[in-house]
Image (cartoon, rainbow, N blue to C red):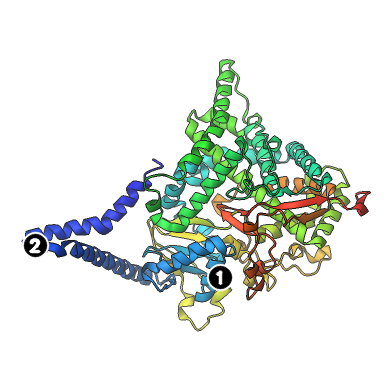
Amino acid sequence: MNPHQYRTRFLLDVSKIFIVPSISLSICLRLATIDLGLSRIPSYILFSVFIFSARVQLDTLRKRRDAYQFNARPIPCVVGKWPGNVDIMLKMLKAFKAAYIQEVYLSLFEEYQCTTLNLRVLWSDQIITMDAEHQKFMLSTGFEKFWRGKNQKERMENFLGDGIFNRDDEVWKAHRLTARPFFARERIAHFDLFEKYSARAISILSSFSSSSTPCDLQDLHTRFALDTSSEFLFGKNLDTLSCKLPVAGATDNTGVKGTVTHDRWGSFAQAFDKCQEIATRRARLGKIWPAFELFKDQTDEPVKVIKDWLEPLVRDALDEKDRLQAMDIEPPVDQKSFLEHLASSTEDVALMRDQVMSVLLASRDTTACLITYTVYFLSVHSDVRQRLRAEILAHCGPSGAPTLETFRKMKYLRAVLNETLRLFPPVPLNVRESRSQPCTLPLSDPTYRESSPDNPEASLPMYMPPNTPIIYLPLLTQRNPTFWGDDAQEFDPTRWLDEQNGDGPNRMADTTSYPLTFAPFSTGPRICLGVNYAYNQVSYFLVRLLQNFDTFDLATDVQPAESLPPDSWRTAEGKSRKKVEKVWPGAALTLFIKGGLWMRIGKSASDSDGL
């Protein structure tokens, strides 16, 4: 697929709306020998508007008819004050820049008392949902009725290309089959890489700690995740932990997601983040995004930087394959890295690069996000930090290395990670598209269905039109008080612990009845292959971190001023995390903290014996 075909698609859409009706009217006028004179152009415009309006109305009537035939109801539609819900679109674009994460979506759900809505922006269906049942249907029970779809491929083709996150059906299955062996239990249980790169990161933190200098932990966690994953998957150490680190208070170190350094690694990281930001902005604009990139694809420059960075890795793997083949040597799969396995199955440099890009996106950003938000919570909840550190020292001592067995015993560690994932899933929203055949979404979860028993339509499924994008929002689902209680916005790891552990009643959501109330790694056939790898990697790092340090203080004095939470958040009505948030959560495909996570870390004088 040509990554720049979006221009053709957009121009065809514009032609269908404006040019085709004008040409048709012109032909009719000529045949009727009617000369409109000076009113010709206004007549063409009015006729185009009339035809477009007629198409919109016919489309709406057809969907209502189809919903009736399916014994279903149309998805409730947001009604704005301006034609095409342009005011809703502008409100959302403004909120994405200034409001708390996904607050604009939540306000619409609350206003319409519904967990699935049709935004109908610019007369085009765009579904949003925080409904657990609808998400389960999309991702699992009705998986075959949805796909990534043409719209997402169009937005991300230049960035992710043929990678696993940008393909469907047989191509996706082939990619997944290739990657699966590298996340087998015997591979992800090798902790030597976790130890190697945890030690490097801890050494860096120790140097900051000894001088009481603030450090951007988000940046450090990103480097740790990338270095570990690159050696695990590619057999090469990208060695980003040895590169230049951000300096607190520097005026030129603010990047797309946090801080950035001005070196080769910094250029790659900035380009990688920029592509994610552009893809996110395109999704928010909907199908009209090409209007802003008709003459220049905004991803061209950052993608070139990424390609220049990754292609040497790919070519080295191909060269190594050629060298081994010349010696008539074929290593078994269990001795190959993921990149070497790719090289043995294809010589397509672009395909290999796209696969590497997708794996980097998953292994770098999602893992770094989980570590970053966990450390953030440990900094603002001293009781959680103390209890977790006590558990770690009880099972591993002040310097012992953790194992799979100790991880199984450290229930509180897993509870802390799950609670972090519940409130801040690394992928806070995602998109699917219905296929060419319409279907119905099952009955909604009880969030609003039970609050409106007098609505007879609440007992009907919802009609899902064909070829329609649907945005699902795990972050809102996992904070839904219907499942998680009145304290759903609060960080409380004990909700994951059993009565048998002596920690009171288990307040965890009923994941048997509503399994999608907690699915930070997705579910169904496209569930993340690296779930256990991520848990092991993050757990290992946290053990080493808390063995070495016990004080974590947010350095708000060096946090970029524009990345601090607005004062207006503190006085917000209702129950919302933004009242207590000390950082500003942001999202561009994956979650991050705006401006970075600047902290001063250390070890209290009273902890001299490590116990």
Total marks shown come to 2
Amino acid at the residue labelled 1: Asp
Residue count near mark 1 (Cα–Cα under 10 Å), binned few <14, some 14–19, many ≥20: some
Between 262 and 83, the residue placed more toward the observer is 262
Q: CA distance from mark 1 to mark 2?
A: 60 Å
Look at mark 2 in the image and give the residue it sits on.
35
Question: Which corner quadrant of the image does residue 434 belong to?
Answer: bottom left
Residue count near mark 2 (Cα–Cα under 10 Å), binned few <14, some 14–19, many ≥20: few
Q: Position of residue 328 (x, y in %)?
A: 58, 17
Which of the marked residues, 1 or 2, is nearer the chain's N terminus?
2
Height in image: 584 above or below 485? above
Between 95 and 263, the residue placed more toward the observer is 263
Q: Residue at x 80, y 66 (%)?
A: 499
Look at mark 1 in the image and give the residue it sits on.
445
Q: Residue at x 67, y 57 (%)?
A: 421
Question: Which corner quadrant of the image does residue 562 belong to?
Answer: bottom right
